[in-house]
Amino acid sequence: MTKESQSNGLQKLQFEVASALDEIPNATKRVFDFFKDLNLDESDRFDLRLSFEEILINAMKHGNAMKREVPVRITASYDLTELRIQVQDKGKGFDVAKVKDPTNEDNIEAYSGRGVYLVKHLMDRLEYDPNNHAVAISKNRKNKKS
């Protein structure tokens, strides 16, 4: 695990977890312990936690095929303007354009796509980096001092 502080105010935490669902509570705790001094309101905490756990599960399940020995890299960071969490797996990646809209009548009963839909609506930004097999979520900071 590494924790960095940079001159531009960027604070960063990076660590890896095994691709196993029992790792999720500890990973979530580590990320939110890192964010604890930011005094996030309950709504932002809820949105971040749900979104983080969703992209982490997707990385473990779809990216690393639930192979415990294949790690998922987590990078949490914040500066004066935003909070960001990136999750990187070792998978083949996916085409985000092929994720079906679960609100479309044809997809209402489908089992996939709901998580990505939720994350898109809860976060200020959802970014895919297909070259590095990474997904990043960002939330703008409210005018609070850290």
Image: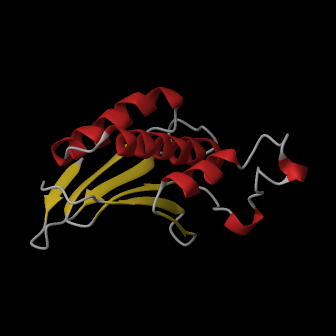
Kindly give the residue lying farthest to the front in the view shown: 143
Residue 117: % across, % down: 64, 53
Residue 55: % across, % down: 53, 48
Task: For residue 123, say whether it is visible.
Answer: yes
Residue 33: % across, % down: 23, 38
Say which quarter of the image contains residue 109.
top right
Residue 120: % across, % down: 57, 57
Task: For residue 17, say whether it is visible.
Answer: no
Q: Is residue 37 left or right of residue 116?
A: left
Q: Looking at the image, is 88 positioned above or below residue 129?
A: above
- Quadrant of the frame with the C terminus: bottom left
Kindly give the residue lying farthest to the left in the view shown: 7
Q: Please tell me which residue is depicted at 12% across the width and 56% down the height of the picture.
A: 145
Q: Please tell me which residue is depicted at 83% across the width and 43% down the height of the picture.
A: 110
Q: Please tell me which residue is depicted at 58% across the width and 38% down the height of the picture.
A: 67
In this view, the residue in front, 127 or 67, is: 127
Q: Looking at the image, is 27 positioned above or below residue 134?
A: above
Q: Is residue 27 left or right of residue 58?
A: left
